[in-house]
């Protein structure tokens, strides 16, 4: 479960900007009248993305949770419950890039320990949930990301980088430091989840 940060880093106010308001209107329109509270998860994402745009750190402060509740007609505590339950919501400021290392069984068997060590060596981060001294990276341990066939996985923000090893971690983090974002997916060039070397079935198309 996510942890709510202390008051020192909390902003004194939060208001949705025009881009967020337009997105919220589109989201809420999907739900029947009186059921707008069902939109709490996507609207929390809107708040988190606005914080990323405005501050460079994707997180949801308490004032933003309060704004979500007011916009959706929900008691604030109901919003807090959702935001602190799901790991995809950050309730403390994070670095520019959020490194999320899957350490569950398939990724562990295929080298997630190496991924973890490479991330720590490249960033100087010692433990989970910490941010590098330069503020560029925050590193989190996560449960299964559902891409086990392409393990081990390193998720950066919302992007999956698959078939990782220590060398590829070094290359990826160096690119991110330069402000480049490599294309997500398999780092060995596999087509989706096809075996190494390419597909072995359904390789021809029959006419007619």
Image (spheres, rainbow, N blue to C red):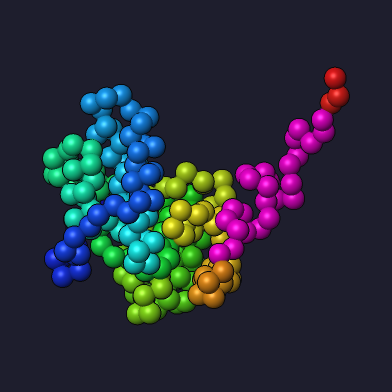
* Most distant residue in the right direction: 207
The part of the image, by quadrant, that contains residue 73 is top left
Residue 183 is inside the magenta segment: yes
Q: Position of residue 5 (x, y in %)?
A: 19, 63
Residue 87 is inside the magenta segment: no
- On screen, 87 above or below 97? above
Q: Position of residue 148 (x, y in %)?
A: 51, 46
Query: For this rendering, which residue is in front, 91 or 19?
Result: 19
The part of the image, by quadrant, that contains residue 170 is bottom right
Is residue 105 left or right of 197 when viewed as pictured? left
Q: Position of residue 166 (x, y in %)?
A: 54, 69
Is residue 104 left or right of 8 when viewed as pictured? right
Query: For this rendering, which residue is in front, 34 or 185?
Result: 34
Look at the image and give the residue range highlighted in magenta.
181-205
- The residue lying at 75 percent from left, 35 percent from top is 201
The part of the image, by quadrant, that contains residue 134 is bottom left
């Amino acid at each position: 479960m996510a942890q709510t940060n202390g008051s020192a880093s909390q902003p004194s106010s939060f208001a949705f900007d025009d881009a967020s308001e337009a997105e919220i209107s589109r989201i809420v329109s999907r739900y029947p009248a009186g059921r707008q509270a069902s939109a709490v998860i996507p609207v929390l994402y809107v708040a988190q993305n606005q914080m990323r745009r405005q501050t460079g750190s994707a997180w949801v402060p308490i004032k933003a949770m309060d704004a979500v509740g007011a916009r959706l007609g929900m008691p604030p505590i109901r919003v807090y419950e959702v935001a602190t339950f799901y790991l995809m919501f950050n309730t403390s400021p994070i670095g520019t890039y959020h490194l999320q290392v899957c350490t569950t069984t398939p990724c562990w068997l295929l080298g997630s320990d190496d991924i973890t060590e490479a991330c720590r060596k490249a960033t100087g981060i010692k433990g989970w949930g910490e941010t590098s001294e330069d503020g560029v990276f925050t590193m989190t341990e996560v449960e299964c990301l559902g891409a086990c066939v392409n393990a081990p996985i390193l998720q950066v923000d919302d992007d999956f980088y698959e078939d990782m090893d220590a060398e590829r971690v070094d290359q990826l983090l160096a690119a991110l430091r330069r402000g480049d974002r490599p294309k997500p997916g398999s780092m060995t060039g596999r087509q989706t989840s096809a075996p190494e070397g390419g597909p072995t079935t359904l390789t021809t198309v029959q006419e007619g």
